[in-house]
Image: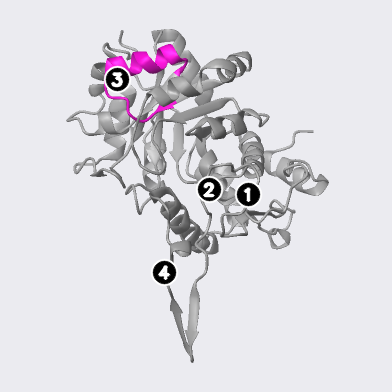
Amino acid sequence: MEVGALGIIGAIVRFGIGAPPNCPQPRFLRCTTPPHMEESAAAASTSTVQSLDNGDGDGEGIQHPHPIRRRSPAAVHYVGPFQFRMETPDNTPRNILEKIVWDKDAQLSLMKERKPLVVLHKLLPQAPPVRDFLGALKESCNRTGMPALIAEVKKASPSRGILRENFDPVAIAQSYEENGAACLSVLTDEKYFQGSFENLHAIRSAGIKCPLLCKEFIIDAWQIYYARSKGADAILLIAAILPDSDIKYMIKICKILGLAALVEVHDEREMDRVLAIDGVNLIGINNRNLETFEVDISNTKRLLEGERGRIIAERDILVVGESGLFTPEDIAFVQNSGVKAVLVGESLIKQEDPGKAIAGLFGKDISLRT
């Protein structure tokens, strides 16, 4: 008897398979039961992996000296019948990533009210088939002898502002594909990157064959289902904002849905955490410092040296270099460090024709025409 994805999800919930093992209850995290899909929609219940504590705490798996807090600590004061929210050092974001996560948490509450998880489950059978994101990267790398390109469809960033005024996401995606991109990354954050899930859906609906990465700040399992309903083939999981149990749980959801999970790290601590998690086969190394936003591509080499590099090679994990890649020399440097793919946005999107700029970035034409 064949069992569909929704049936598997129901079985996972019913028999307790797939929840993070020995799920702890640290001050950072509360793990709740995954969605229980019964035959009757009325019997379905929705839930998520949510942040519980807003202090620094000793959140499981997050060993950064300044861990990203998942929500703003409450600082509400009452004077008679009036309520005031006071800004203090404790409830002010310590960096841009923390600010993005806090705003994302508030935005998600509204999105989940408008489209509960039970509704998303009903939309999944209508979503276009999942394409092989990891396979496309490997095929391109083998064909060209160079890192496969994940080209980013990106209008703006919090550090650089507007990157492209004349922004047509479908036209940009088509140009990327024609000029050798193996996969595409589509920004879906609206407030800070001026992206949208509608851009993702439009690119998928336009007949683009490149597998699509949903570039979103994922802090809730609901976002994974929403990305799949819009046509995503892969999602981004950022180790800096997710405890280990969240990453494990979300990777299992991705496997059920057929999605690839690109797990992004920024430093040695995050790399060590991710290498300790079963099921990771795609790691992104972001060369941008989360607190200063400075970029140093030698970060890629540093994280792939020694024992870490040996483990990655032994497990056949594909590594993606991210941020600070502008020249053929940059591409060669990260390739020699051990990466098999690169994710590039700014250095392409700012050019008059982003697709044609790919040959300049790699130092040669990597399209299928060659």
Quickly name the residue at label 2: 67
Quickly name the residue at label 4: 87
Q: Earlier in the sequence, mark 1 or mark 4?
A: 1
In the drawing, does residue 183 fall left or right of residue 308? left
Q: Are marks 2 and 3 in contact (CB under 8 Å)?
A: no
In the drawing, does residue 319 fall left or right of residue 117? left
Q: Earlier in the sequence, mark 2 or mark 3?
A: 2
Q: Quadrant of the N terminus?
A: top right
Quick check: 226 above or below 370? below
Judge whether residue 130 can be spotted in this image: no
Tag 4's secondary structure?
Answer: loop
Of tags 4 and 3, which is closer to the observer? 4
Tag 3's secondary structure?
Answer: loop
Q: Residues within 10 Å of mark 2 (few under 14, many from 20)?
A: some
Q: Position of residue 200 (x, y in %)?
A: 40, 41
In the drawing, does residue 80 fall left or right of residue 349? right
* C-alpha gap between disc 2 and disc 4: 20 Å
First to last magenta residue range: 321-340
Quick check: 253 above or below 280? below
What numbered label is drawn on residue 311?
Answer: none
Of 262 and 3, nearer the camera is 262
Of 262 and 73, nearer the camera is 73
* C-alpha gap between disc 1 and disc 3: 44 Å
Q: Earlier in the sequence, mark 4 or mark 3?
A: 4
Seen as rendered, the residue at the extreme left is: 352
Of tags 2 and 3, which is closer to the observer? 2
Quickly name the residue at label 3: 179
Residue drawn at 44 percent across, 79 percent down: 84
* C-alpha gap between disc 1 and disc 4: 24 Å
